[in-house]
Image: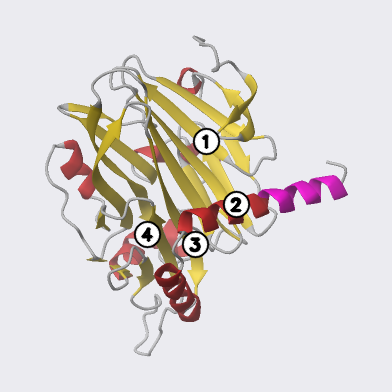
Amino acid sequence: MRTEPGHREGLCEIDGIACYRVPDVDRLPPFLLTVVSPSEHWLYVSSNGGLTAGRVNNDRCLFPYRTDDLLHHVHAFSGPWTGIRVGDMLWEPFTSRLTPGSRRDLARSVSGDRIVFEETNPTMGLTVRAWWAFSDASGFVRTVHLERDSTGPRELEVGIIDGLRELVAGGAGTGVMQSMSCLVNAYTRAELVDDSTLATVAMESALVDRAEPAESLRATTVWSTGIPEATLSLDPDAIHAFTRGQDVEPTGLLRGRAAAYLLTAPLVLEAGERMTWSIVADVHRSQAQVADLRRRLAGDEDLADSLAREVTESTRALDAILVDTDG
């Protein structure tokens, strides 16, 4: 495998986190990793980006529950997706279409509770890192760092799209997702809450064939911080518009289809500058929990710092468990 200084296999530090790095992971056959939590979260991820995650069990999924062999293929339509455009050049990091000249690495924290995908595009002079981590209070935290090197013009105009696809509606268990996913999609309703970045993904009603009330009272929640001027779309077709060079229209309500949560924004990066944003998702949330989250997003002036503290607390809790069990 090709390696460069600072990108060799082994122990390293990335963004201040002690990790074990696997360089040039795209040259290896896909393999499965687990990311562990001191709480009830679970996350299984393929080295090529496909993943499934949830809380407690496989009936509380963020993305559809799939077995190892299928997880290696779902990155094409499920889970996170990032697109970056500079002028007429389109870069799709972390996908199966590796850009010539790019380098892709994968690393997991030494504690085992965080994973990061990293890809560098020397032609654009950009590096993007996408972290997955846990917060007991907030759920699943995906934090993306986009860094520019010190070459090229003083300012670089960059268009980005980043988000999550095929979000499972609250109340849809594994059994119905695997046997009647088209019906689950038909019952799905995704909507933005007021003028916030908070979106809920729920079912219009429970799946029943009897003429009786059957409310679905649980929702998947997604929100973001870091790019306040971003356009928000719940429509997965926003990706196709972006890749074709078209404007992405905001979509605050989606019904009858598998939902996405996609941020689109123009950025201007100076030499050596880094931009950071986070997308946070959780599952099986009640109406009261959604209302509490709405109030939190309206009242917390520094969500990024709050998230960082929560993730750090989760790492400390896991380390304490390992110490107690002589891990």
- Which residue in the protein does label 2 denote? 311
**Magenta region includes residue 104:** no
Vertical arrangement, residue 275 with respect to residue 100, above or below: below
Vertical arrangement, residue 293 with respect to residue 269, above or below: below
Question: What is the span of residues highlighted in magenta in the rendered image?
Answer: 315-324
Vertical arrangement, residue 284 with respect to residue 88, above or below: below
Among numbered discs 1 and 2, the one appearing first in the sequence: 1
Among numbered discs 4 and 2, the one appearing first in the sequence: 4
Q: Give the amino acid type for the residue marked by disc 1 in the picture.
A: Val
Among numbered discs 1 and 3, the one appearing first in the sequence: 1
Tell which tag, 4 or 2, sits nearer the viewer. 2
Residue depicted at 84% across the width and 46% down the height? 323
Mark linked to residue 116: 1
Q: Between residues 312 and 93, which one lies in front from this camera angle?
A: 312
Q: Helix or strand or loop: what does disc 2 sit on? A: helix
Mark linked to residue 181: 4
Q: Are there few (<14), some (14-19), or many (20+) residues within 10 Å of tag 2?
A: many
Q: Residue 261 placed where, x, y %? A: 33, 55
